[in-house]
Image (cartoon, rainbow, N blue to C red):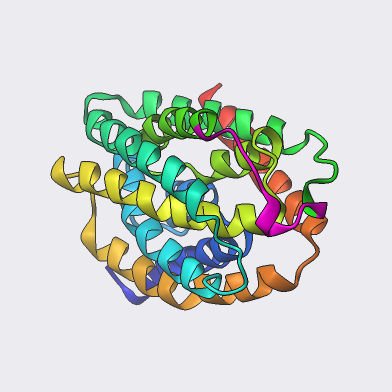
Amino acid sequence: MDFGFIITIFLIGFVGSYISGMLGIGGSIIKYPMLLYIPPLFGLATFTAHEVAGISAVQVLFATIGGVWAYRKGGYLNKSLIGYMGISILIGSFVGGYGSKLMSEEGINLIYGILAIIAAVMMFIPKKGIDDIPFDQVKFNKWLAAGLALIVGVGAGIVGAAGAFLLVPIMLVVLKIPTRMTIASSLAITFISSIGATIGKVSTGQVEYFPAAIMIVASIIASPLGAIAGKKVNTKALQIILAVLIAGTAIKIWLDIL
């Protein structure tokens, strides 16, 4: 565990957490492939898919706290949406996180690839007029939101990703939640989800604590900075950035699977 290793892991955590705060995702859509591919590229540690998922789950827990704190004012957080989707995704993520111990690395990567491609397709579906809705007039189907969050939680718990990269397109496309409210609320839901995923990963011994600790420090610094930037960036630009990131990650994962 030399200085180069510490810097590399810190930078991976910083970049992922900055994006997490800005786009309302846990950051694992970025950090999962970065942890898997970048350290070996520089002759540093090689993590297994189980270890990467475990590190990601713990790190997301802290990245989302910083993001939610930065969005706490301004009416961005939809408490009803957070309640319905948060409880459901917590149950699902614990089941997925605990059950992932029984899966092969190829199985974990396959599920990650499937989730990423679904999210990428959804992000490119046109979202007309959602940002014209005042925050205090936002309505959504509560049981549909809860059901979708449960399904996302199981899959996300398996890959240690907390599921925000799927939650965001679901909230934008299916539930018709305005972009900035989606970003803030998905961070809160992702925080709840990451609790279940983290407990599942830790209890089955899938977490490497030293690299996880480095990424936690990076998260606490970078996530609030990303959230501040996210408030200033045009909502259409935020949607495009997220769509491109998800699509790029999906392509990379599937190239490796195939």
Q: Is residue 102 above or below residue 162?
A: above
Nearer to me, 183 or 21: 183
Nearer to me, 19 or 103: 19
Left or right, residue 55 beside residue 206:
right
Q: Position of residue 89 (x, y in %)?
A: 39, 39
**Magenta-span inclusion, residue 219:** no
Q: Is residue 98 above or below residue 229?
A: above
Q: Position of residue 156 (x, y in %)?
A: 42, 37
Quadrant of res 171: top right
- Asked whether residue 31 appears in the rendered view, the answer is no
**Magenta-span inclusion, residue 137:** yes
Nearer to me, 181 or 103: 181
Q: Position of residue 179 (x, y in %)?
A: 70, 53
Left or right, residue 189 beside residue 92:
right
Instruction: State the quadrant of the N terminus.
Output: bottom left
Image mark count? 0
Instruction: State the quadrant of the C terminus.
Output: top right
Identify which residue is drawn at 29% across, 51% down. 195
Identify which residue is drawn at 64% across, 40% down. 169
The span picked out in magenta is 132-142
- Asked whether residue 79 appears in the rendered view, the answer is yes
